[in-house]
Structures are given as structure tokens and as C-alpha cells.
């Protein structure tokens, strides 16, 4: 191979190679070895075979730079500046320590149930039929029953006709924001909050108004002031196991927030993304207390069932439902009936409850393992709240930490983390990182924390030296 490659490098472009027989004789190699070498060199683009003619040294083609400048004039300025791909969506090699993930590791999914459900769905009518625009009636009923099971006496429970099945909650957020908030109008968001909600709001062209939130949710008085000052009529929040903080609103706060929302004739968009990820508590939807259409409730199965089964639902009452449904119809027409049938198969099997009980213990073990690693190896950092559910630890770093540089340095060291800045709709309230304990290989959590701690100590030293 080396001798042949050397001959090719010195040959003129278009020179014909000797025949296979000649190469075997010249290099005293077997025909198999020569053929393998020729295939390798062809794959590298060094030679080319012309059937019936022979094999030749490939001519070097000079790459002509392509000018796409004309698109600048055609596209003009974007409606909204979109950040680069969020860390949560980044794919990584198997050998890195991935603490950035946005989805649970495969071993936390009901794999056997999902595979069996997809097989059954493929054999039925769902593999060939078109689903109704609002979703399969059976799946609508299941989502409605889930919310109704938490509804107290005296409140009219949600009905199947209130449900819109979605191809994931992210697309649902886009439709909800477009339908309920006019371009340029204000939208209240918890801060920090889910990066996907920030992205959806930017794409909808609305004006984002941050509302500070803490370990026990937002202050009702602050929320009222934000409504009053901004004139907003929509507030997006995650009352259960918020992403990224893991915060869960106390049940007593539900009625206070609802009172504020109702007093301003507004909507609460409740994103119950982590409903199935309770560890020491159970998710209690705020929407269970509302039957007057003030709460738009989102429930996703994409993370708890499988990322490949992108199925979610919005439960909306009144004219707002028709607006959102019309937007969904224009956007995607309908959700795959195959995926809807499969999702329904999974969540109605007895094994689903068994899986969720086991998932609690798995998440608890992972959460405690990562929290212990942070306490041991990042003593200068603080986990402000051990989450009662969800998938993440929200870690406050020492003041003055260059988080962006820390993220880059960690990446170079084989540890992938996510900067907390991605979860703030405005300027970050401090130096934070989000560490996911549901990702792969929890046995390496301590190793990852050691790397972060060592780099953080170096960052602090560098910061002190710069300030001297």
C-alpha cells in the first residue's frame, strides 16, 4: 500500500495504473491485498476506475468558492435572532461525561413497552390511516382523564373534546404563543425558565417580560405587578419540577397565582413537562383547579415514554382552543396516528405503572449521586434546592465565574455541561450551570464533578489574578 501510494503521489494526474496482475508481480503481494489497497485509494479519492478502460490517478479538482451573498438581500434581517443550538440537543460521543442532556437515558425508558406498542400499532389501522386534526379520541380521553383525576370536587373536569394532541410540546408552545399573543405584544415568562419556551416566544415575535421565580415559585405580588406594568395577558410557567431549577410550587400557591391570572383576565400556560418524573412528591397540576378556561395545560409523553414517540397534548377550553387547533392544522395538519396509537398502548398497559414506580427510585439514586459529587468536588458551588422531581440540578457557581469559558474548558476535558444563561429570558441572575442526572453512565458522575471542580478552581485563580 505504501509503495503504491508513493507511486501515485509522484504520478501525473490522469496517469494509468498498471494492471492488477502487474501490481501483484511488482509488489509481490496477493491479489486480495492489491484489490483491498485499490478500494482504499478509490475511497480516498486518489484514483478512479473507468469500466472497460482501466484505473487512473484522479485529476485534482480545484474547489471553486461558492458565493451565497445574493441570499443576504433576498432574506433580509431575521424576524428574531435565534441562539445557536441549545446544549440540551447536542449529541456527544459515548466516551464523554454527558451532564448536559435534555432527555432521559435509554435505561430510564420503558423500552420493552415501547417496542411492543410500536409493533402492535404497525399491525393496525394506525399504520395507514390519517388521525383527526385534534387527535385520536381514545388518546384525547386518556389525557382528559389524567387531568380529571386530580380535579377537586366542585370543579368541572376536563373533557376529551378539550384536548388537542400535539407532535411534542415544543410545537404546541409555538402554536399557543402565536394564537394567544399578537406579534410585538408582551408575554410573561418565569425567569429562569425552559429555553424552548424562550425560543418559541422569539419565533412568535412577542415581547418577553421576565418574572423572577425561586425555589418555591414566583411571588404573586411580583406577577401582579408584571401584568399591571406590561399589559400582558399570558403567563408561561412550569409549576412542577421546573426546567432548569427543579422547583415545585407549593399547592397553596396554585390558588394565589390563579387569582392573579383571573383578576387580569389572562391565561396561564402551564407546562407539565415533568409530570412523570416525581421523586419524593407527585405532580399536582394547577389546571385541575380551573374550569373557566384561564389555564392552558400542556402534558408531554416524549421524555417519559420515548423521544422517538413525540406525542403531547394541550388541554384548552373555550375559543382559545379553536385558535390553537387552527394554528396546529396550518402547521402540521395532524399527528401521526401510528405514534398516537403506540403512545396510548404504552400508557394504558399495567407495566406503565410498574415502570413509573421503578423510575422514581432510579431518579432518586441518580439525583443523590450527582448531588453528593457536587458537594464533594465543587465545594465553592451551591445546589440551592435538591429537586423533588425532574431531571436536573441547578448549580450556582461562585460570583465572578466565567461560565462560558468553564463550559468550553469542560468540553475539552471530556465533560459536557450546559451554561445556565440559556434558561434566562434576559440577563442571567448569576453564574449557573444545569447538570442533568438522567443522562448516561451515572458511575462517572463523580469523575465529571472532579473535572468541573478542578477547572473551576483554576478559573477562580485566574479571576483573582486578573483583578489584582
Image: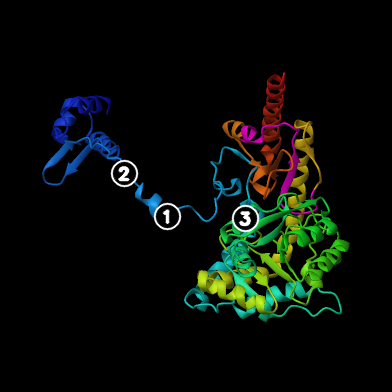
At 79% across and 38% down in the image, what residue appears?
A: 382
Mark closest to the chain's N terminus, 1 or 3: 1
Give the colour scheme shown: rainbow
Q: Residue furthest right?
A: 252
Q: Residue 429 appears at what percent x and percent y?
A: 74, 43
**Sequence order check, earlier mark of 2 and 3:** 2
Secondary element under disc 1, as helix, strand or loop, is: helix
Q: Which residues are magenta?
A: 387-407
Q: Quadrant of the C terminus?
A: top right
Where does label 2 land, which residue? 66
Which residue is tagged 3?
196
Contact check, label 2 and label 3, Cβ < 8 Å: no
Residues at marks 1 and 3, CA–CA distance in whole angstroms = 24 Å
Which quadrant of the figure has residue 64?
A: top left
Q: Earlier in the sequence, mark 1 or mark 2?
A: 2
The relative height of residue 399 versus residue 207 in the rendered view (above or below) is above
In this rendered view, identify the residue nearer to me: 297 or 50. 297
Residue 91 is situated, as x and y percent measured from the top left of the image, at 54, 46
Q: Is residue 367 left or right of residue 339?
A: right
Residue at numbered disc 1 = 75
Q: Residue at x 68, y 78 (%)?
A: 162
Q: How crowded is the residue under tag 3: few (<14 C-alpha within 10 Å), some, or many (20+)?
A: some
Q: Provide the secondary structure element on which disc 2 rests.
A: loop
Task: Kindly report which numbered mark, 1 or 2, lies closer to the viewer in this rendering.
Answer: 1
Query: Is residue 121 in view from this perspective?
Result: no
Mark 2, other Cα within 10 Å: few <14 / some 14–19 / many ≥20: few
Amino acid at each position: 500500500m505504501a509503495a503504491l501510494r508513493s507511486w501515485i503521489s509522484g504520478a501525473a494526474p490522469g496517469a494509468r495504473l498498471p494492471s492488477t496482475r502487474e501490481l501483484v508481480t511488482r509488489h509481490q503481494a496477493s491479489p486480495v491485498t492489491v484489490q483491498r489497497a485499490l478500494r482504499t485509494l478509490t475511497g480516498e479519492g486518489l484514483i478512479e476506475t473507468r469500466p472497460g478502460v482501466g484505473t487512473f490517478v484522479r485529476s485534482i479538482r480545484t474547489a471553486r468558492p461558492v458565493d451565497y451573498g445574493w441570499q443576504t438581500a433576498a432574506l433580509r434581517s431575521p424576524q428574531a435572532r435565534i441562539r445557536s443550538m441549545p446544549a440540551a440537543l447536542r449529541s456527544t460521543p459515548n466516551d464523554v461525561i454527558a451532564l448536559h442532556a435534555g432527555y432521559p437515558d435509554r435505561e430510564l425508558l420503558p423500552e420493552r413497552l415501547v417496542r411492543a406498542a410500536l409493533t402492535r400499532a404497525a399491525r393496525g389501522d394506525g399504520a395507514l390511516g390519517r388521525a383527526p386534526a385534534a387527535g385520536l379520541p381514545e388518546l384525547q380521553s386518556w389525557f382528559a382523564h389524567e387531568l380529571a383525576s386530580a380535579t377537586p370536587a366542585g370543579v368541572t373536569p376536563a373533557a376529551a373534546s378539550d384536548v388537542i394532541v400535539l407532535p411534542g410540546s415544543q410545537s404546541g408552545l409555538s402554536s399557543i404563543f402565536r394564537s394567544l399573543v399578537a406579534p410585538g405584544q408582551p408575554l410573561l415568562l418565569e425567569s429562569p425558565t425552559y429555553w424552548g419556551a424562550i425560543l418559541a416566544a422569539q419565533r412568535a415575535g412577542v415581547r418577553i417580560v421576565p418574572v423572577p421565580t425561586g425555589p418555591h415559585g414566583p411571588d404573586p405580588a411580583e406577577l401582579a405587578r408584571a401584568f399591571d406594568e406590561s399589559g400582558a395577558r399570558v403567563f408561561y410557567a412550569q409549576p412542577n419540577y421546573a426546567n432548569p431549577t427543579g422547583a415545585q410550587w407549593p399547592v397553596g400557591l396554585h390558588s394565589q397565582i390563579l387569582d392573579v391570572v383571573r383578576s387580569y383576565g389572562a391565561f396561564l400556560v402551564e407546562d407539565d413537562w415533568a409530570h412523570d418524573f416525581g421523586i419524593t412528591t407527585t405532580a399536582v397540576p394547577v389546571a385541575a383547579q380551573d374550569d373557566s378556561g384561564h389555564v392552558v395545560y400542556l402534558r408531554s409523553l416524549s421524555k417519559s415514554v420515548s423521544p422517538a414517540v413525540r406525542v403531547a397534548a394541550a388541554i384548552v377550553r373555550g375559543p382559545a382552543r379553536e385558535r390553537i387547533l387552527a394554528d396546529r392544522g396550518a402547521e402540521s395538519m395532524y399527528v401521526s396516528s401510528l405514534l398516537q396509537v403506540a403512545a396510548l398502548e404504552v400508557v394504558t398497559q399495567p407495566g406503565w405503572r410498574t415502570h413509573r414506580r421503578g423510575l422514581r427510585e432510579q431518579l432518586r439514586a441518580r439525583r443523590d449521586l450527582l448531588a453528593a459529587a457536587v458537594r464533594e468536588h465543587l465545594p465553592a458551588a451551591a445546589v440551592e434546592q435538591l429537586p423533588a422531581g425532574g431531571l436536573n440540578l441547578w448549580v450556582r457557581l461562585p460570583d465572578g465565574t466565567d461560565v462560558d469559558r468553564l463550559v468550553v474548558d469542560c468540553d475539552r476535558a471530556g465533560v459536557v455541561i450546559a451554561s445556565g444563561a440559556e434558561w434566562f429570558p434576559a440577563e442571567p441572575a448569576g453564574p449557573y450551570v444545569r447538570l442533568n442526572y438522567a443522562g448516561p453512565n451515572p458511575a462517572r458522575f463523580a469523575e465529571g464533578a472532579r473535572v468541573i471542580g478542578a477547572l473551576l478552581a483554576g478559573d477562580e485563580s485566574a479571576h483573582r489574578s486578573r483583578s489584582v
